[in-house]
Image (tube, helix red, strand yellow):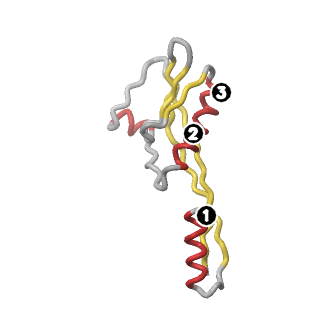
Amino acid sequence: MNLHRELGTAFANKLGGNSTLIEYLHTMKYLFVIEKGPRNLSGYFPDVPGCVTTGKTVEKILANAHEALELHFMEESKWPRARTLAWHLDKGGLKLAATDLVTWVQHEKTGALAAA
């Protein structure tokens, strides 16, 4: 049973069972940097340490990036703050090569909570 369902059930029980479920969608866009290697592309999320992926084409690495975020957040209950490219360049120490590509990858999470 997932945490949101457990919380919803506990909340409903506390209210005597007179509740409805509120569904929610949480969306974040994370900066994604793609670097060109000798044989393929590699990419990483500066805001999500350890979340990296590779691919032979831009299309493949972007598909892999979505999957990497999904797998990463399966284990994490708290999402890191998504910062802007300007913040990363000015304050975050991000250094880009002339061949790097920068884009954003959107991640969505849905759930439900009980409400009175």
Label 1: state its secondary structure.
loop
Residue 9 position (above or below residue 99): below
Label 3: state its secondary structure.
helix
The quarter holding residue 90 reads top left
Q: CA distance from mark 3 to mark 1?
A: 35 Å
Q: Which residue is mark 3?
A: 59
Front residue (pair 23, 67): 67
Front residue (pair 13, 103): 13
Pick whichever of labels 3 and 1 is earlier in the sequence.
Answer: 1
Q: Is residue 65 left or right of residue 81?
A: right
For label 3, the crowd category at 10 Å Cα-Cα, with few meaning under 14, some 14 to 19 and many 20 or more, is few
Pick whichever of labels 1 and 2 is earlier in the sequence.
Answer: 1
Q: Residue at x 61, y 87 (%)?
A: 16
Front residue (pair 80, 3): 3
Front residue (pair 113, 105): 113
Q: Residue at x 60, y 70 (%)?
A: 113
Marker disc for residue 1: 1
Q: In which quadrant is the N terminus drawn?
A: bottom right
Q: Which residue is mark 2?
A: 105
Between circles 1 and 2, the one closer to the viewer is 1
Q: Position of residue 72 (x, y in %)?
A: 52, 44
Q: Are marks 1 and 2 in contact (CB under 8 Å)?
A: no
Label 2: state its secondary structure.
strand
Determine the residue located farthest toward the front in the rendered image: 1
Between circles 3 and 1, the one closer to the viewer is 1
Q: Position of residue 25 (x, y in %)?
A: 62, 58
Q: Amino acid at mark 1?
A: Met
Q: CA distance from mark 2 to mark 3?
A: 12 Å
Q: CA distance from mark 1 to mark 2?
A: 28 Å
Pick whichever of labels 2 and 3 is earlier in the sequence.
Answer: 3
Q: Amino acid at mark 2?
A: Val
Residue 4 position (above or below residue 68): below
